[in-house]
Image (spheres, grey):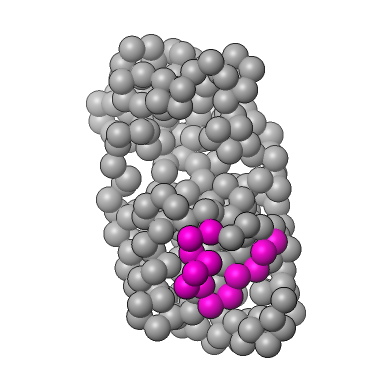
Amino acid sequence: MNAAGLRAARDRLRRAARVAVLTGAGVSKESGIPTFREAQTGLWARFSPEELASPQAYRRDPEQVWRWYAERYRNCIRAEPNRAHRLLADLEMRRPEALLLVTQNVDGLHARAGSQRVQELHGNLTQARCERCQRTAPLGDPDTLELPPPCPHCGSPMRPNVVWFGENLPSSALEAAYVAFLEAEVALVIGTSGVVEPAASLARLTAQQGGLVIEINPEATPLSAYANLSLRTGASEGLSRLLDD
Ligand SMILES: [Zn+2]
């Protein structure tokens, strides 16, 4: 690996007034959170993703969709944030005004590790959202979950607070992400293949403005072509190299 490149990146990261971070499934992997596809095992293997995670599937059989999300929810709350989550939370604590964390993950582990400013592009599966008043609520005890859970404000049924196939990403999170990557002096992209939009275009914005793009991923991705530094390793190991004193 390029030691001089790593030193320069560490230096730039330390001095940057604005840092934008995008995290994906690779960051939660070390906490044992299965990816969306990996979660489709056992009883769920016979369904296509669209049959479990789309507005049509939910209209057809809300209880079935909820059972799938309840199972994933149980896995999430049993999991613990890992070193990568903690390093990112520490980075924010040291430089609260500098950092915006954008995630494709729906497990809520960044917040549990202590990150405060998190934009969740795909929602959060530890929460439900009311179909009528649109307010969100935490799911609570997984063993006594009523499916679908009733809204604590108006009593209407609630749906998982995640973005499904065919749905738009939440516009406020998306706008915050674009602004952060546009203004960033350093963009850090961790554990995501960068194939899916908006992941693909976010770091490109930083690069176009002359910012530094750092990628941490065990495999090469489309981003690697224009990243200034690619650390071919897992999320915790890569972040340790970048951030540890
Ligand atoms: Zn409601």
Q: Position of residue 189 (x, y in %)?
A: 52, 63
Above/below status of 25 relative to 64: below
- In this view, the residue farthest toward the left is 132
Asked whether residue 207 appears in the rendered view, the answer is yes
* Extent of the magenta region: 221-233
Q: Tell me the quadrant of the picture where the C terminus can be found.
A: bottom right
Q: Is residue 24 magenta?
A: no
- The one of 207 and 29 positioned closer to us in this rendering: 207
Above/below status of 83 relative to 206: above
Task: Tell me which residue sits at (33%, 12%) in the image.
Answer: 60
Asked whether residue 112 appears in the rendered view, the answer is no
Q: Tell me the quadrant of the picture where the N terminus can be found.
A: bottom right
Q: Position of residue 230 (x, y in %)?
A: 60, 70
212 sits left or right of 165 in the view: right
- The one of 58 and 147 positioned closer to us in this rendering: 58
Task: Tell me which residue sits at (36%, 62%) in the image.
Answer: 201
Q: Is residue 222 magenta?
A: yes
Task: Tell me which residue sits at (60%, 14%) in the image.
Answer: 43
The answer to which quarter of the image holds residue 89 is bottom right
